[in-house]
Amino acid sequence: MKTGKKLFITDFDGTLLKDDKTISQENIRTLEILRQKKIFTAIATGRSAYSFEKALKNIGMADDFLPIDYVIFSTGAGIMEFPGGRVIYQKDLPSYDIREITDYLDHKKFDYMVHKSIPDTQYFLYKSHGKDNPDFYARLALYKEYALPLNDGHRHEDPATEVLAIIRGRINMDSLEMIKKDLSGFSVIHATSPLDHKSSWIEIFHKNVSKSKAASWLINRLGLSRQNVISVGNDYNDQDLLVWSGKGFVVENAPACMRQVFNIVPSNNQCGVSEAVKKAGWI
């Protein structure tokens, strides 16, 4: 066990991962230096564990080459040790909650996907309401070997990690707040699509799921204080983590509304993760 009393957390897509889907050598070196200083390192991503590991393989990176200790995945629904992939924390939606959520989404005519519980999160059932929704179908094509259509009258008997609704274009913030109000018994998290970078993803989880709540569980396990946590992000689903952390930074490619609130560092293509560590005085 490390003796350090600090934790550094970075988002993955659009933050640590560059637009060309690689990780800069400077950022890798920064993470190595933090670990040499006995500082814990973690990635907090909206990706499932499967999708995260697939992304590393796509850039030819072996697990033990990425100097991190933990991955907070599925927007905080799970935490795994890294490398190795041992899941140490997870939160699922029970079947009765899934029925409530899907009934609501059906009423709203939103296209959605119901992802199985950890560790099988890459498998999902999907339902389309026949609208023109290119991002929904692009994601369906990307994971076609794991997808099955959700038939009318289907009753959910198994737990799930999340229900993901994909809405074409940027959602009106008033509409988003209404969805959150209507589904107030759950954690409703808004993210920009990592596929077309325009559509709105509405992720619905167990009420205790978020990046910050997963990070809070992790620091309690490690015996750390949240004041000794630095986080870096780029999108709406990072906001709670950035607020919760002792210091929160956004890369320059974050939405304007987030750049107005948090400390700004260079973009994901210009080693903003490394700059955040330097600005915090940790190296």
Image: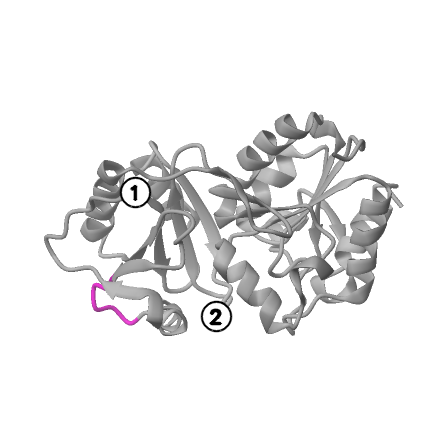
Quarter of the view holding residue 262: top right
State the SS at label 2.
Answer: loop
- Identify whether 237 is placed above or below 267: above
What range of the chain is rendered magenta?
127-132
Q: Disc 2 marks which residue? A: 196
- Is residue 130 part of the magenta span, yes or no? yes
Residue 11 visible (yes or no): yes
Q: Nearer the viewer, residue 10 or 165?
A: 10
In the image: residue 13, left or right of residue 122: right
In the image: residue 123, left or right of residue 217: left
**In 3D space, how far apart are the residues under numbered discs 1 and 2 (Cα atoms)?**
29 Å
Q: Disc 1 marks which residue? A: 159
Q: Residues within 10 Å of mark 1 (few under 14, many from 20)?
A: some
Residue 248 visible (yes or no): no
Q: What residue is at 59 percent from the left and 69 percent from the top?
A: 57
Going by the numbered disc 1, the residue's amino acid type is: Pro
